[in-house]
Amino acid sequence: MLNTLNHIAIIMDGNRRWAKKNKLDQIEGHRKGIETAKFIAKHCHNKNIKELTLYAFSMQNWKRPKLEIKSLLKLFSTLFEDKSHFFIKNNFKFNPIGRIDQLNEAVKIKINSLKEKTKANNAMTINVAINYGGIEEIIDTYERIALNNEKNINRKILKKYSYLPESNEIDLIIRTGGYSRLSNFLNLHNSYSELEISNILWPDFNQENLEEILSKYKKIERNYGK
């Protein structure tokens, strides 16, 4: 029997290497990466996938050069602008996860505005991990648990106070760019996720690459430790 697939997460790696390979500024790699993300999101919806989590900007990315960070946040700001109709047009729910409150006010306002405008959309949920870290999510989860004086902490309680309390378990994590590491991504949610590494740089990742991975996934025997 083929595996069902409800929730995919993607580590979109390779934007900077793609830009260097094509003799372009790094920000052009990130810009192309956003276009790839939109295309892949629409294809996931066409495959009846209910939820997609995209790793856009990690807590550790703040260590990058200041000019790159400034340009990247400006790019995010444009994406999250009210005039951007991608989520609305496709009936996608936008759900930002991470330490959003630590971002600058302009970006934060646009993120929260888009979240509010799309909260009733139900074609597919797209969780965008921005200013996100898996360890940081665990810390924030335990802080929420403590604030609510929860006792007898178990898996259900952890999920309730995590960044993704209502999400399906993550069936599949895809990392592009060839590196086989999780990079502090979804530590609370990846216990039995299948992991696929693609050597394709994210801006070059396409429908055929995704289809190949999905076909492979559906044939895997998933027994969850049984």
Image: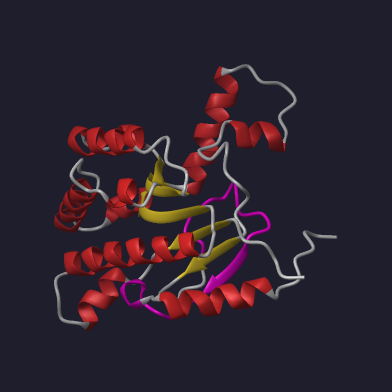
Left or right, residue 45 beside residue 25: right
Could you tell me if residue 114 is visible in this image?
yes
Magenta: predominant secondary structure element? loop
Say which quadrant the N terminus sits in.
bottom right
Which of the 4 image quarters holds residue 54?
Answer: bottom left
| Residue farthest to the right, as pictured | 226
Instruction: Please state the extent of the stretch shown in magenta in the rendering.
Output: 182-204
Could you tell me if residue 185 is visible in this image?
no
Nearer to us in this view, 189 or 110: 110
Residue depicted at x 45% and y 80%: 208
Which of the 4 image quarters holds residue 43?
Answer: bottom left
Left or right, residue 169 beside residue 52: right
- Place of residue 42 in the rendered image (x, y in percent of width and height, measured from the top left): 40, 62
- Place of residue 84 in the rendered image (x, y in percent of width and height, measured from the top left): 22, 48
Q: How many marks?
A: 0
Left or right, residue 23 beside residue 216: left
Which of the 4 image quarters holds residue 11?
Answer: bottom left
The answer to whether residue 119 is above or below residue 89 is: above
Tell me if residue 147 is in the magenta stretch: no
